[in-house]
């Protein structure tokens, strides 16, 4: 018969969650949250803690009085409940305390080291979650009450991939140009086939080779998670792939900007190279900013090239499903690969991506739910105090160090009291929007120049310009919500993934994945460098 003692861990966790939620609600922890910059999530912390705590207590009580069964309710709620609650507590601790503390420590060490460890090692919730899972399973071990819940990790990761589709839009690719789309496609497929060849050369398991090919060829963590079920990859193999991508990216962050400067690459060319050769988004951004911190052109190009690889994910899934089927001796047909074997969660990704591209979540030209609105309206106007600050600085000649186009953008901001196109062109929507966006880009360039210490402006002047730029940047609430779900799905899933990585499995994997990753990464970086210099010109974003 079920005994309440067997479910005491879940009861204790549920009680702690309820107590934590009530404490947060009182505001006692607000000073700490402000220090950690997590105070904006205060309402979410209360809501999530109370709901999860209530479910934990309710489920534990039901389990203690109910005979074990195999119904849908048992398999999908009662049995995995303990593991789900435990992993969620770990995810909450990482998101709201561990990651912010790592950021603060990284910032405090920057004057001594000259860089932020957080960014260089990419110590975000993804990496910290995997590490937390690895440490737990190789020290204390996975508690018996949590075993069923840990097995849910892969399913939850797939849900995260589905949510990923809402962050991108096909219209964004219109800014790339034909050469750039072909460039990404060539290197994505080329890298995938190179890794498959290397796997055969070094006699590596098909599962390891397949998941590494996706990770190195497409888009890092997301591709690794998406392809793993297709090639039946183990948790250890997924972890090795993610580790290889992050490690190679750290080297690229330092090497790419140096080579780009020595080769005399333009901002657009370097952005294209970084977006093609580096897989992790944070590391792509870091390399782009290290090369050019004066304006956002390099970063924008790098981001666009980087997200383009995501669109090749379904293609690579089909390619690797076909390859894996042939290698394992399965009889293949279009139906067996594309219809029967094509992962449902990738279809979910495509559905959300299609909805996003049709503008159902926000304007179809958005990027990760963010879009620009330079229309005339009261919301985007600078405040009277900000206008006085800007006008006073202009009268005093404080903007004399800006270049001609940046100076003109500041002049227009003061004249119109907001970022917008020419008033006389307001009926010509395309021209009006084009001019407004150009002015916004110039003002962003001013802020970047100040940050890079190329230009010196008073703090209140910089703040006024920054607020004006922020006003025209909008976020889709729908995409923000879906992104929040995605983050929590990934946080949960990757902690569970880490719990499946034992010392024995790490020892058995060997070092070949790193060798294959480095070879494919260096080949792609080298070839893409020369191809970018040859094909990519400064008209990519026109």
Image (cartoon, rainbow, N blue to C red):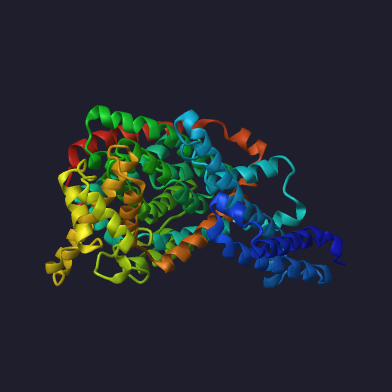
Q: Residue at x 64, y 62 (%)?
A: 27
Q: Residue at x 46, y 40 (%)?
A: 119
Q: Residue at x 58, y 65 (%)?
A: 43
Q: Nearer the viewer, residue 477 or 521?
A: 477
| 94 relative to 114 in the view: left or right | right
Where residue 50 sits: x, y (%)? 67, 67
| 500 relative to 197 in the view: left or right | right
Res 130 → quadrant: top right
Where residue 122 sits: x, y (%)? 49, 41
Residue 15: tell me if it is visible.
yes
Where residue 89 sits: x, y (%)? 66, 56
Q: Nearer the viewer, residue 178 or 136?
A: 136
Q: Residue at x 76, y 60 (%)?
A: 10
Q: Is residue 25 above or below residue 106?
A: below
Q: Residue furthest left?
A: 424
Residue 185: tell me if it is visible.
no
Q: Residue furthest top?
A: 262
Q: Nearer the viewer, residue 16 or 303?
A: 16
Q: Quadrant of the N terminus?
A: bottom right
For the image, the number of numbered tags is: 0
Where residue 240 sits: x, y (%)? 53, 39
Q: Nearer the viewer, residue 159 or 192?
A: 159
| 22 relative to 474 in the view: left or right | right
């Amino acid at each position: 018969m079920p005994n309440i003692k067997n479910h005491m861990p879940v009861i204790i966790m549920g009680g702690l969650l309820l107590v934590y939620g009530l404490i947060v609600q009182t505001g006692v922890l607000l000073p700490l949250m402000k220090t950690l910059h997590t105070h904006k999530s205060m309402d979410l912390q209360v809501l999530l803690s109370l709901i999860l705590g209530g479910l934990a207590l309710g489920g534990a009580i039901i389990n203690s009085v109910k005979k074990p069964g195999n119904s849908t309710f048992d398999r999908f709620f009662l049995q995995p409940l303990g593991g789900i609650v435990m992993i969620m507590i770990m995810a909450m601790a990482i998101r709201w305390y561990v990651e912010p503390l790592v950021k603060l420590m990284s910032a405090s060490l920057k004057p001594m080291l000259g860089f932020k460890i957080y960014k260089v090692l990419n110590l975000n919730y993804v990496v910290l979650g995997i590490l937390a899972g690895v440490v737990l399973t190789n020290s204390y071990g996975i508690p018996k009450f949590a075993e069923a819940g840990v097995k849910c990790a892969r399913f939850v990761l797939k849900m995260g991939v589905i949510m990923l589709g809402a962050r991108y839009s096909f219209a964004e690719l219109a800014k790339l140009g034909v050469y750039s789309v072909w460039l990404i496609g060539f290197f994505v497929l080329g890298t995938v086939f190179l890794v498959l060849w290397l796997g055969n050369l070094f006699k590596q398991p098909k599962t390891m080779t397949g998941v590494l090919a996706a990770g190195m060829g497409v888009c890092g963590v997301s591709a690794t998670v998406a392809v793993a079920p297709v090639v039946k990859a183990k948790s250890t193999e997924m972890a090795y792939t993610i580790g290889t991508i992050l490690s190679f990216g750290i080297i690229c962050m330092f090497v790419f900007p140096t080579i780009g400067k020595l080769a005399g690459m333009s901002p657009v060319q370097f952005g294209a190279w970084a977006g093609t050769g580096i897989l992790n988004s944070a590391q792509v951004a870091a390399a782009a900013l290290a090369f050019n911190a004066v304006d956002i052109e390099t970063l924008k190009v790098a981001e666009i090239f980087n997200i383009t690889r995501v669109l090749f994910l379904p293609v690579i899934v089909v390619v690797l499903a076909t390859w894996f089927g042939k290698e394992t001796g399965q009889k293949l047909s279009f139906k067996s690969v594309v219809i029967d074997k094509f992962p449902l969660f990738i279809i979910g990704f495509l559905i959300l991506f299609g909805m996003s591209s049709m503008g159902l979540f926000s304007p179809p030209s958005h990027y990760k739910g963010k879009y620009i609105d330079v229309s005339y309206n009261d919301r985007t106007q600078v405040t009277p105090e900000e206008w006085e600050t800007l006008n006073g600085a202009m009268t005093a000649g404080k903007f004399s160090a800006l270049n001609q186009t940046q100076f003109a953008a500041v002049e227009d901001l003061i004249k119109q009291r907001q970022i917008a196109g020419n008033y006389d062109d307001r009926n010509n929507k395309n021209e009006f929007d084009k001019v407004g966006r150009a002015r916004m880009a110039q003002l962003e360039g001013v802020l970047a120049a100040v940050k890079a210490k190329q230009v010196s402006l008073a703090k209140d002047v910089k703040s006024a310009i920054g607020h004006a730029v922020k006003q025209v940047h909008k976020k889709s609430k729908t995409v923000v919500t879906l992104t929040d779900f995605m983050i929590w799905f990934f946080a949960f899933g990757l902690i569970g993934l880490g719990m499946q990585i034992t010392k024995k499995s790490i020892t058995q994997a060997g070092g070949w994945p790193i060798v294959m990753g480095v070879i494919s990464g260096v080949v792609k970086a080298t070839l893409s460098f020369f191809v970018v210099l040859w094909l990519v010109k400064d008209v990519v974003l026109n």
